[in-house]
Image (cartoon, rainbow, N blue to C red):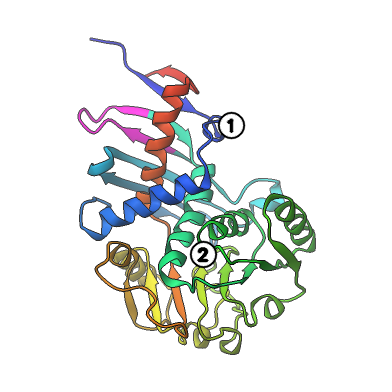
Amino acid sequence: MAAQEVLYLSRADVERVGMTMREVIEAVEAVFVEKGNGRVEMPPKPGLHTMPDAFIHAMPAYIPGMKSAGMKWVGGYPENYKRGLPYITGLLILNDTETGLPTVVMDCVWITAMRTGAATAVAAKYLARKDSEVAAVCGCGVQGRTNIEALSLVLPRLKTVRAYDNLPDNLHCYVKEMSAKLSLKFVPCSSPREAVMGADVIVTAGPILKHPTPAIEAAWFKEGAFASPVDFDSYWQPAAMALADKFCTDDTKQLEYYRSVGYFQKIPALYGDLGEIVAGKKPGRQRDNERTISANLGLALEDMATAIRIYKIAKEKGIGRMLPL
C-alpha cells in the first residue's frame, strides 16, 4: 500500500499563498451561484458551547463543481482578547472527492476573516446602492477590517468610513492601520450613533451575543442604506431591523436554526437567500430608497470555495509541509 500523506499549511503558509481579497470575492460569488442552483451539499453545522456566547462549530460542505469537499472546525470565544488570543481559531480539512482521503489540513483564521468580508461584498454588489459613499463600521476587530477592504472593491464610489469601537485603543489602531492600507478617509467616532446615522453602508462586527443590549435605532437607518450585521442582531434594535424592505440571509435553514435557539427573534419576513439573488432567481435591489439587510451567518461553502484555491496554489508553489497519515 502506498504511503499516505497530508499537506499541512500553517496560518503563515496560508497567507504566503498570496490569494487576494478580490480573488476570495470571486470564489465566494461563484459558490453562491452554485448554491442558488442547488449544486452543493451543506449539512447543518453542529456545535459545542463551553462558555457563554462562545462556540465550537463543525462546518462540512461539498461543492461538486469545484471538486472541493471538507470541514472547518472553528471556535469563537469573545473573551479571548483578555488572554491575548484571537476571537476566532480553528482548522480546516479538505478531502479528495474520489477517495475521501484527507489531502490538506490548514489553519482557518485567515480564510474565515477573508471569506466573511467577501460575503458582505457579494451581498453589497447585489443589494447596496452603487453610488454608496459613506460606510459605518461598529466593531474594529478583524471583521471590521476585512469587511471594509472587501466593500472597497465592489463599491467604487466609497470615500469615507466612520468607525466606532467600545475600546478606544482598538479604534485608534484601526483608523491608523486602515488609513495606511486603503485610499479611504477613516473617521473615528465616539458613539455608534455618530458612526451609523445617515451612512449608506453599515457593518456591525462586534461579538455575537445571545442577550445583547443593541444600540442601533430605527432613526439611524436611512432610506437606501444597506447593512451587513456580521454579529447577527447584537448591534441592532428590532425596530431598526424591521425597517428593511429586503431582509436576506446567506442560508435560510441556518437562519431558522439560529432563531430556534434564541437569535433573530424579531426580524422582518425573509426576502430571500443570497444564493437565489446571485444566481438570478430573485432580484436584488430594485429601488434607490430600499433599505436592505443581508444577515450572513457564515457558510462552510465559502470556506471550501476559498480553501480549494489555496490548496492548489500551495501545491504549485511548494508551500507547506507534507506529514504522514
Which residues fall within the magenta stretch? 92-103
Q: Residue at x 65, y 82 (%)?
A: 197
Q: Residues within 10 Å of mark 2 (few under 14, many from 20)?
A: many
Q: In the rendered view, would you say 306 is above or below 5?
A: below
Would you name the residue on which mark 1 appears?
12
Dot 2 and dot 1 residues touching (CB under 8 Å): no
Q: Residues within 10 Å of mark 1 (few under 14, many from 20)?
A: few
Given residues 197 and 41, the one toward you in this image is: 197
Quarter-of-image position of residue 266: bottom left
The quarter holding residue 29 reads bottom left
Q: Position of residue 14 (x, y in %)?
A: 52, 34
**Judging from the image, what secondary structure is the residue with disc 2 in?**
loop
Q: Amino acid at mark 1?
A: Ala
Residue in view at x 54 percent, y 62 percent: 53
Q: Is residue 324 visible?
A: yes
Which numbered marker is on residue 263? Answer: none
Indicate left or right for 77 with 23 as reference: right
Q: Residue 270: image x %, image y %?
A: 34, 78
46 vs 295, left or right, is: left
Residue 105 position, x and y percent, is 42, 31
Residue 157: in magenta span: no
Is the residue 246 above or below the residue 250 in the image? below
Question: With respect to residue 316, does 245 lie above or below?
Answer: below
Q: Is residue 115 left or right of residue 78?
A: left
Asked whether 98 or 180 is in front, the reply is 180
Q: Which residue is mark 2?
A: 230
- For the question of whether residue 263 can be seen, the reply is no
Residue 224 image offset from top left, x and y in percent: 50, 82
Q: Quadrant of the N terminus?
A: top left
Residue at 49%, 23% in the rendered image: 320
Going by the numbered disc 2, the residue's amino acid type is Val
- Between the residue at mark 2 and the residue at mark 1, the CA separation in whole angstroms equals 25 Å
